[in-house]
């Protein structure tokens, strides 16, 4: 079975920060989902024969000029549709209902009252808590629809036209704060749309192995191995598929975490007995990045330099033409895949040169991070790799804000090691998605030992997340932050100030560049 053999659920993205979360929740229900921009023609959507379509929320009002919309022919195509928040309002407006700014918007946890029989709420409590985020409200359903739930600020909090399999909910069932939200999504997927629950970790592995074998045949393959979970799981999948046709290549860019090179050697050469080529290329990368400040240029330079190193290794391996990368679905989205805006070019997507000699093998390209971890566990990878916090492919090159120098790399490595040590010491490592240090290439005035100092600040960044598409700043206990700050200032030369970043994503990104 390939991806095309699963029942497909298409999520149409109207600009919601939760569109990726909706897609993940569908997959957690064992149905395969993909996200498409709202500019995708309905004819293209229907040509893919989706089993169901979900309209995401979004920040706009259906009443503003240029509000995101979709061809209403979708509603008559015979495909079950679920509108969420903005998607529900759009469905109601397009089919003749009334959406109005009532002056009593709802934000956050809200009581919901189920007022009618609906497949979405079968066996669920009549009174329950849901997560709302809306200013407009549906006040009158379209002809043929019935209202089946209400809330204090939403007269029509859920509506349906069961004959046409059209459903809408004003709240967000994909958010964990909606207590029974996943059950509602499953009811839509299974009871309304008739999806088959075939998307499992075992099926992902079986399909990936089959696809890799079909693509590679009996040729040599190299894998860019960083030591992180993505490249490790990609390597494990390819090794399962083609065995000793695989050679892993670890490139020491000089932009790695403290002690990273030794750890990768120990784990993959000695524990896994994988053929590993270790390329020491710190001078090459740092030289290419000399005086480069713009983060997009950094990413593209790093991406191209990686490829050139891999090409050189490949020539020594009988001209291997296949390159394995741990590219994930969020990498594609953030790098501007399809009609998405470029948030940042991931070095393994938007940073790749056009004239490279390789054909890419990307067995994780359709997966979110939590799916990758589950696949890693299924493949038997050790816990300390599967649950390792993410580390950017460009490494510390995108955590030094400004020009990169060997001195600044060393300063950041030492500060970053302290952050991770203290997070582990506090027992927070698994709770936090990422925790690390950032070094802005500026200096600030301080006083140490009664003398004036003029040294670097270090910013501590720590976030909680499920998939890195959205993230919240981690509420680290004050005593842990205090230990970090004290140790960094006392143990890392050239640092006289420590700050903690309390920005969520959005509006910020997790990494600073």
Image (cartoon, grey):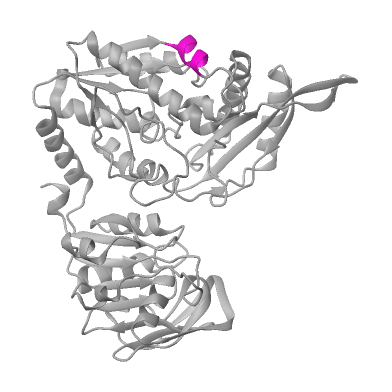
Give the residue drawn at x 30%, y 30%.
Answer: 325
Residue 138, compared with residue 18, is above or below; it is below
Residue extent of the magenta highlight: 281-288
Picture coordinates of residue 94 (x, y %)? 36, 80
Q: Is residue 52 left or right of residue 456?
A: left
Q: Position of residue 254 (x, y in %)?
A: 49, 15
Quadrant where the image shows the C terminus: top right
Instruction: Provide residue 458's location: percent of width, then percent of height.
Output: 67, 29
Q: Quick one: 251 or 335, which is closer to the camera?
A: 335
Return the x and y of residue 391 as percentages of the image width and height.
Answer: 46, 31
Viewer-proximal residue among 298 and 4: 298
253 relative to 374, above or below: above
Res 123 seen here? no
Question: Residue placed at 22% from the left, 61% from the top?
Answer: 44
Residue 153 or residue 12, whichever sits in front: 12
What residue lies at 87% left-to-right and 19% top-to-bottom?
449
Q: Is residue 130 magenta?
A: no
Q: Quadrant of residue 483?
A: top right
Residue 190 showing in the rendered view = yes
Q: Main secondary structure of the magenta part?
A: helix
Residue 417 falls left or right of residue 282: right
Residue 285 colored in magenta in the image: yes
Would residue 501 be found to the left or right of residue 272 on screen?
Answer: right
Q: Please, is residue 198 above or below residue 299 in the view?
A: below
Counting labels gives 0
């Amino acid at each position: 079975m390939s991806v095309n053999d699963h029942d497909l659920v298409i999520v149409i993205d109207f600009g919601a920060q939760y569109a990726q979360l909706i897609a993940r929740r569908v997959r957690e229900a064992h149905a395969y989902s993909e996200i498409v921009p709202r500019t995708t023609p309905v004819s293209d959507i229907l040509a893919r024969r989706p089993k169901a379509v979900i309209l995401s929320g979004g920040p706009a009002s259906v009443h503003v000029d240029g509000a995101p919309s979709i061809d209403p022919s979708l509603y008559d195509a015979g495909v079950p549709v679920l509108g969420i928040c903005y998607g529900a309002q759009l469905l109601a407006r397009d089919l003749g209902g009334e959406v109005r700014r009532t002056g009593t918007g709802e934000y956050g946890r809200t009581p919901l009252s189920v007022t009618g029989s609906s497949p979405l709420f079968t066996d669920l409590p009549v009174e329950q808590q849901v997560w709302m985020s809306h200013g407009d409200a549906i006040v009158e359903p379209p002809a043929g629809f019935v209202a089946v739930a209400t809330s204090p600020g939403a007269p029509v909090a859920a509506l349906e036209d069961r004959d046409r399999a059209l459903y809408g909910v004003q709240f967000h069932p994909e958010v964990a704060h909606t207590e029974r939200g996943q059950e509602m999504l499953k009811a839509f997927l299974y009871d309304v749309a008739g999806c088959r629950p075939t998307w499992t970790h075992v099926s992902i592995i079986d399909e990936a192995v089959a696809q890799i074998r079909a693509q590679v045949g009996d040729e040599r393959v190299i894998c860019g191995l960083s030591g992180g979970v993505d490249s490790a799981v990609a390597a494990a999948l390819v090794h399962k598929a083609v065995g000793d046709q695989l050679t892993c290549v670890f490139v020491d860019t000089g932009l790695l975490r403290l002690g990273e090179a030794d750890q990768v050697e120990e784990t993959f050469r000695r524990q896994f007995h994988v053929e590993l080529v270790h390329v020491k290329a710190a001078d090459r990368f740092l030289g290419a990045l000399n005086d480069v400040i713009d983060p997009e240029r950094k990413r593209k330079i790093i991406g191209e330099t990686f490829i050139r190193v891999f090409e050189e290794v490949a020539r020594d391996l009988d001209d291997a033409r296949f390159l394995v990368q741990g590219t994930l679905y969020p990498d594609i989205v953030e790098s501007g895949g399809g009609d998405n805006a470029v948030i940042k070019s991931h070095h393994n997507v938007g940073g790749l040169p056009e004239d490279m000699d390789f054909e890419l093998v990307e067995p994780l390209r359709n997966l979110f991070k939590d799916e990758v971890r589950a696949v890693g566990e299924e493949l038997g990878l050790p816990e300390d790799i599967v649950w390792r916090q993410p580390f950017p492919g460009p490494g510390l090159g995108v955590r030094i804000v400004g020009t990169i120098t060997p001195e600044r790399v060393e300063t950041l490595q030492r500060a970053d090691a302290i952050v991770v040590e203290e997070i582990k010491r506090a027992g927070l490592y698994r709770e936090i998605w990422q925790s690390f240090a950032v070094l802005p290439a500026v200096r600030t005035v301080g006083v140490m030992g009664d003398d004036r100092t003029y040294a670097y600040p270090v910013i501590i960044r720590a976030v909680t997340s499920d998939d890195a598409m959205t993230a919240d700043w981690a509420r680290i206990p004050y005593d842990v932050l205090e230990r970090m700050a004290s140790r960094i200032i006392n143990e890392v030369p050239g640092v006289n100030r420590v700050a903690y970043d309390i920005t969520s994503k959005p509006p910020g990104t997790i990494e600073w560049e």
